[in-house]
Amino acid sequence: MAHRLRWLPNALTIVRLVALPVLLVVLIEADGPTSPLAAGIFGAVAFTDFVDGKLARAWNAESRFGRIADPLADRLLVGLALIGVILLDRMNPLAPVILIARDVLIIAAFAALLAHGIEMRVDMAGKVSSALTMVAAGAAILLDQAWVDALMWVAVALAVGTFLNYSRIAVLRLRSEPRPRPEG
């Protein structure tokens, strides 16, 4: 049966992408500084990330589409939640802005590297960083508590650390790429 459902992990990724406009509308219409409805939608959509990853591995249904679209859908979901934190005027926008900027840079760098034939993969530290950012963003949409603000800053620190690690890996891969020999 699992082989007939191999399409499901990619379908869940697509569902995440389709849910983004709904979440955006709810965040825009929320009064703030929190929105339980937006937090619920965010949590449900974020949960599909966990499910699709588990299913893809269990059913050996990992695909090139999934390796590219899944992290992109996650980044867009988290980015939207961080924008929501700003829209709700929930906290000082510096932490969400840093996290958004890091994600934009990583998406652009991964795409540029892919154009050079270098496929970067999300490592365990990146997955932990994404999960922590996801939890912090969801919690910030749901709760107006100081510990959530602290959690957001821990997410920032881990995100910056993983960004530096990905940068190091990218530089090493670019350096090891064969260069054309000069004519002469």
Image (cartoon, rainbow, N blue to C red):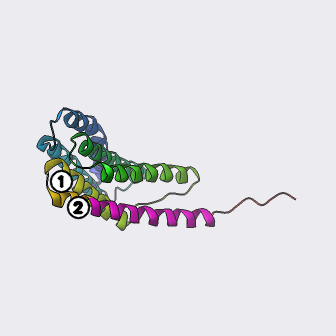
- The C terminus - image quarter: bottom right
Q: Residues within 10 Å of mark 1 (few under 14, many from 20)?
A: many
Q: Residue at x 14, y 49 (%)?
A: 142
User: Tag 2: residue type?
Assistant: Leu
As helix, strand or loop, the secondary structure at mark 1 comes to helix
Q: Does the magenta segment cover residue 155? A: yes
Q: Residue at x 11, y 44 (%)?
A: 36
Q: Residue at x 32, y 46 (%)?
A: 79
Q: Residue at x 84, y 57 (%)?
A: 183
As helix, strand or loop, the secondary structure at mark 2 comes to helix
Is residue 1 visible to the viewer in this orientation of the structure? no
**Nearest the eye: 70 or 7:** 70
Reply above or below: 74 against 159.
above
Is residue 172 visible to the viewer in this orientation of the structure? yes
Reply above or below: 41 against 152.
above
* Residue farthest along the right direction in this orientation: 184
Residue 111 lies, in percent from the top left, at 50, 49
- The answer to whether residue 176 is left or right of residue 50 is right
Q: Which residue is mark 2?
A: 151
- The answer to whether residue 163 is left or right of residue 43 is right
Q: CA distance from mark 2 to mark 1?
A: 9 Å
**Nearest the eye: 70 or 155:** 155
Where does the magenta region start and end? 153-175
Q: Which residue is mark 1?
A: 139
Q: Are marks 2 and 1 in contact (CB under 8 Å)?
A: yes
User: Tag 1: residue type?
Assistant: Ala
Mark 2 or mark 1: name the one nearer the start of the chain. 1
Q: Nearer the viewer's eye, disc 2 or disc 1?
A: 2
Residue 62 lies, in percent from the top left, at 37, 56
Residue 156 lies, in percent from the top left, at 33, 60
Residue 134 image-quadrant placement: bottom left
**Magenta residues: mostly which secondary structure?**
helix
